[in-house]
Image (cartoon, rainbow, N blue to C red):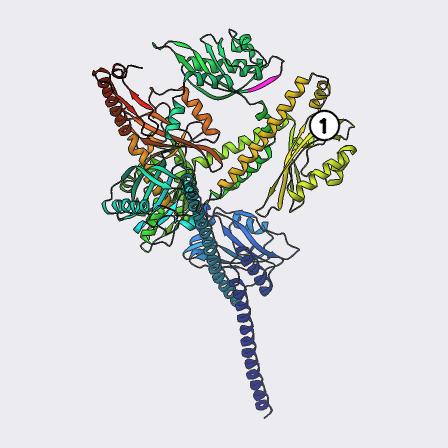
Amino acid sequence: MFHEYLYHEVSNLREKLAHLERETQSQTWFKKLQALMGVISKIRESLDLETIFKITATEVRQLLNADRVAVYRFLPESEWNEGEVVSEDVLPQYSPSLGARVRDYCFGEQFAANYAKGYVQAVTDIYKARLSPCHLKILKRFQIRANLVVPLLQGQHLWGLLCIHSCGQPRQWQEDEIEFARQVGDHLAIAIHQAELHLQTQRQIAEIEVAQQKLRDSEQKYHQILDSIGDMVLVKGPKSKIVWANQAFRDYYGMTQEELQDIVDAPFADTDNTLQYIKDDAFVFETGQTLQISEEPVTRYDGEVRLFSTVKTPIRNADDQIVMTVGVSRDMTERKKTEEAVKASETKYRSLVETSQDMIWSVDALGRYTFVNPAVKYIYGYEPEEMIGRPFSDFVTPEQSQKDLEVFARLLAGESVFQYETTHIAKDGSMKHLMFNAIALYDETGNFLGTTGTATDITDRKRAESALQHANAELERRVEARTAELRQTFAALTASETKFRTIAATMPGALFQFCNRDGVWQVDYVSDRVFALTGVTAAEMTRDLNTFISRIHPEDLESYIASVSEAVENLSPWHYEGRLVKPDGEIRWWQGDSMPTRSENGEIVFCGVQLDITDRKVAETAIRNSQRQLKEAQRLAHVGNWEVDAIMGTVTWSEELFRIFGLEPAASAPNLAEQVALIHPEDLELWQTQVERGLAAGIPFDLDLRLCRPDGTLRHLNAVGRAETDASGKVLKLFGTALDITDRKAAEAALRQAAAELEDRVSDRTAELSQAVAQLEQEIGDRKEAEAALQVSEQNLRTIFNNVYDAIFIHDLEGNILDVNNRMLEMYKVSQEQATQLSLKNDYSSGDNPIEQMEELWERVLAGETPRVEWKARRPNDGSTFDAEIALSRIHLNGNLSVIANVRDISDRKQAEAELQQAQQFMESVLNTIPVGVFAKEAEDLRFVLWKPGGQRVARFQ
């Protein structure tokens, strides 16, 4: 009986124990599920990889009570044989492994495939698991005793490993712990994929913003070009409604762009004239022909009516439909005055030479002066007679002698020299900085006679340039920032086919798409812009990709293939910079960017953009050279520069400024108290007052002061300061230069005893310097104003530029052609590629032109005038010539001074003038020979306006 009772109690006890175990397991399972959901939730809260890794490592280590949890990522190019620890959470008593690189050359071959299939490794004790020696060595390096490793997969690709370590002792990993780790690994892999997609999206957004900015900059460029044309340019839509007008038109009408928008003509215009404008517009719209109007009256805003020569051209859209007209009108009123100026007499030319402030000279074949104008007296201090017959080498400094002789040898060889700078010695022994322009002279049989040219005294300019060093440094910094922005690439992802091709045709780079189809690389699409970059047409590249690969520079081919192979293998973003050799031998730098993807049928597809970065590469080299030269120039000239940030309150000194103050160059400038201690007590109030006025009101200053170096020596300093303000006039920065003028001050003390004539010359020179500073300030102000441009469509602006009736050249101050319009290509019968590679003087100009006019025209353009001249133009390909009227003006493009030339073919007009002159001569000969007196009188005051010899016999007086 007792045994039955005991059996019954034991059975009840076992049943209760089993129930308790099931309840405990259920609670434990629920808690672990809660913990897993908590970890997953925290992982998915962020899109930042570093945050995701840190949360995973910390949470998993705490929940599994492990000694270390690490996230390990394989390096893409290592074939799973090398990687690094990108995140970890570890107890303090164990060595950290964050950032450690691990190389295991067995893993990629033996284990990577299993892990890619989801294999999880759980090792209770590394010393009893029969691991390979190399694997055991790696685990011992990080004090690992027990190991739980879960793969992190991106689809079928093994991205990395989630590693859970027990370092102090062996550990038997439980099934629920292994499952927990596997679940965390799966969700961590998803979070990694989402974070990388987010990062890629942000990068693409940034690239799109950069591309949009490029389009805006390009639009602004064409805006500047059209606004810089001296002729009036007017774009009209249907019904003669004004769409856009350039600056010349707006100034003539005295109206803004907004006031002109959508009107037919100004309210003050003559009604009959307006009706004729409408008829002319309708003719162009209906016939599609270019209409040339030799003369038409146009009323100015002040009521004055002037005559203009106008050419109206249709503008067509992509469907070849006429949507607008562009008219270019040239003021004919001043043309006769310009012609009279061009035909000035030798007396007037001689007067110009005699009164020129620049030296005008000629030397014979031996380099001896045969002519100099009176300007040499002010430049060298010699009378002209003292220099005639002497070789130019008598006046050259020893340092410049060899270089000047080499330049003279170039002139002997027939070259021309422009803006050559050298240093000569004046009569009083002072150094004169001169800028020479020279050409060779030949007799009618081609024998060399000598050279002639001009020399400009640029000594004052050289001194003034030092005051602009800080501005140049700031400009270079901005260029560097802009250059860094240009490293971004362009990829248009979500545009329609029509919009895509419009962008592809107008953007500065070439869009492309190529893929690996059945093991063969094929080009599906490339925009036409690729021809300007590579010299290979889009059609040729589409037929055979090797037409592009063959243009890659031989030294870059290996790195190019490697970059593409890496991108294909890892489906990683592709970025490459290298050189291309065009068919004509020209070498261009290019940049390629793409994001390879795998299509649904398994093809690897590259969609991206190719950009011409030659200018950027050249700019980077020039900037580096400029920075180095600037530092060296400051050191040699003892000129330092400084800057005060009015907003941040920081002060920056150049290295040379430290040396001028007798200090060792340091990372930061001395504080205010230290600077005050270095200023001479008698000059301290003046210095403080000038600086405070500059910071408070932006007032520039130029003062001389004394400073006391730490070694006790006294130095004299010339300080020049200028302010940079915002639109409201608030001072943002105060910057300037400091020149050590101790030697100059000593010289000034000695010169105070000189004659009154010398004092007058110093006073005149000071006035000239003040004028030069004012001119520099004016030029800086003009440059800032030129940077403000209206926002109009780039495509319309370029269309207007190309449809202007005149041929347009844009070239720099060295004569290099930067851009031309389509009318120029038609007029000169050259291709786009030829247009900018040929020479204005040698290829586009006939040898019959008076070369001596070029110097005068150039000086007038640089002085801000817009001269017009008749010229004999030449077509380079067939050598034919035609009469042209050229209007020149200067223009600021991208911060650089350039020259724009409008060329109009006046062959028909010249032929008509010749025929008219011939007819007039014929009539005069008839009147002179007939035996009849011929005379004419004016109707009002009866003055004789025509009298022929026969009239003497009739009227009996002369």
Which quadrant of the figure contains the N terminus?
A: bottom right
Is residue 520 visible in the rendered image? The answer is no
Q: Relative to 395, is 320 above or below? A: below
Residues 588 and 368: in front is 368
Asked if residue 361 lies in the magenta stretch, the reply is no
Viewer-proximal residue among 261 and 38: 261
Image quarter for residue 685? top right
Label 1: which secondary element: strand
Q: Residue at x 56, y 88 (%)?
A: 8
Q: Which is more toward the observer, 810 or 536?
A: 810
Q: In the picture, which quadrant includes the C terminus?
A: top left
Residue 483 in picture, x, y percent from top left: 49, 40
Instruction: Give residue 377's quadrant in the image.
Output: top right
| Percent coordinates x, y for residue 752 in the rendering | 72, 20
Q: Residue at x 77, y 36 (%)?
A: 677
Task: Judge whether 454 appears above or below 53 on screen.
Answer: above
Query: Which residue in the protein does label 1 denote?
Result: 716
Residue range corresponding to the magenta coloring: 429-433
Mark 1 Cα-neighbour bin, 10 Å: few <14, some 14–19, many ≥20: many
Which residue is nearer to you in this view: 632 or 103? Answer: 632
Point out residue 362 in the picture as x, y percentages from the top left corner. Answer: 47, 12
